[in-house]
């Protein structure tokens, strides 16, 4: 952390956008620069997806999802190498980034019962200000009062390539075409669902990272935050 980058008052900073836009890298870098905590809300939806799969609950089964949500506790624990996700005390970090869990997370995230459950989890995790929260509805629904809101986007082919490179080398490494197909499907699900769809908040600053390095994106965000803080 560079203390000179810490704003004079603690803020909530939100970063929304589609898959592969660079939100995670940017949010982590920005949180470090500001001396803030980092909140990865996608990881929480992924945690519900893992719990649903383990319990054999279908993403269409609202009653089953409601019972499931009442029985689970998700925690995000900051560690040197990143956030660890605990499901009822078990570390499930290694399970949540597979293409299957990505699609299942998108499916369960469309269900109001799951969103209501995670709303309070997210607000609890950001109860103390000084946080960078990343997701799809941070600036619109979960933290409408946030002082600094960003919407990060990039060309779909660039986003698919970035995601492909992240997954490459893992046991279930898929082809570029399949990564791009799944990403477009997930974006469609996330942007067209009835509750809290992916969309920029009216007061969000939009940044297109297609032709920017992620370090340049962070620089732009820092400039804006220091202008308002
Ligand atoms: O950011 P991610 O790819 O880890 O998110 C996984 C899924 O979770 C994403 O497809 C949609 C959902 N999600 C959401 O609906 N709202 C959020 N704030 C974060 C994620």
Image (cartoon, rainbow, N blue to C red):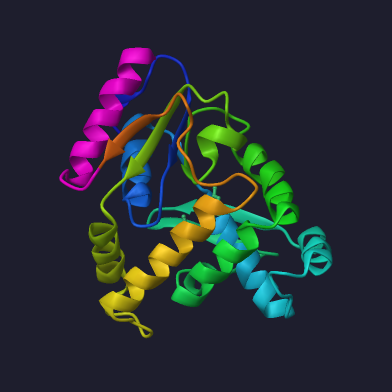
Q: Is residue 35 above or below residue 53?
A: above
Which secondary structure class fits the magenta region best?
helix
Residue at 67% in and 70% down: 51
Q: Say whether residue 111 is magenta.
A: no
Q: Would residue 79 appear left or right of 140 to someone viewing this image?
A: left
Image point (62%, 54%), residue name: 75
- The quarter of the picture where the C terminus appears is top left
Q: Is residue 124 above or below residue 223?
A: below
Is residue 108 visible in the rendered image? The answer is: yes
Going 39% across and 37% down the picture, which residue do you hit? 151
User: Can you tell which quarter of the image residue 209 is in?
Assistant: top left
What x and y, as percent, mark residue 61?
A: 77, 70
Q: Which residues are magenta?
A: 209-229
Looking at the image, residue 213 sits to the left or right of residue 150; the answer is left
Residue 219 colored magenta?
A: yes
User: In the figure, residue 181 lies in which quadrant?
Assistant: bottom left
> Horizontally, is 194 left or right of 138 in the view?
right
For the question of whether residue 4 can be seen, the reply is no
Q: Nearer the viewer, residue 190 or 71?
A: 190
């Amino acid at each position: 952390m560079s203390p000179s980058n810490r704003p004079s008052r603690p803020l909530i900073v939100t970063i929304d956008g589609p898959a592969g836009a660079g939100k995670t890298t940017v949010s982590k870098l920005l949180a470090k620069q500001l001396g803030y905590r980092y909140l990865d809300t996608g990881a929480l939806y992924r945690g519900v997806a893992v719990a649903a799969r383990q319990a054999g609950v279908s993403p269409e089964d609202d009653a089953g999802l409601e019972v499931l949500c009442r029985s689970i506790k998700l925690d995000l624990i900051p560690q040197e190498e990143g956030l660890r996700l605990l499901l009822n005390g078990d570390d499930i970090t290694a399970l949540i980034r597979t293409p299957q869990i990505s699609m299942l997370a998108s499916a369960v995230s469309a269900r109001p019962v799951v969103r209501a459950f995670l709303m309070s989890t997210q607000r609890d995790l950001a109860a103390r200000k000084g946080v960078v929260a990343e997701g799809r509805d941070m600036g619109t629904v979960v933290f409408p009062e946030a002082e600094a809101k960003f919407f990060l986007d990039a060309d779909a082919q660039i986003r698919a390539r970035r995601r492909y490179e992240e997954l490459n080398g893992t046991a279930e490494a898929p082809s570029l075409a399949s990564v791009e197909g799944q990403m477009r499907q997930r974006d469609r699900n996330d942007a067209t669902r009835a509750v809290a769809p992916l969309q920029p908040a009216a007061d969000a600053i939009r940044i297109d990272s297609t032709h920017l390095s992620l370090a340049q994106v962070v620089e732009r965000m820092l400039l804006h935050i220091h202008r308002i803080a």
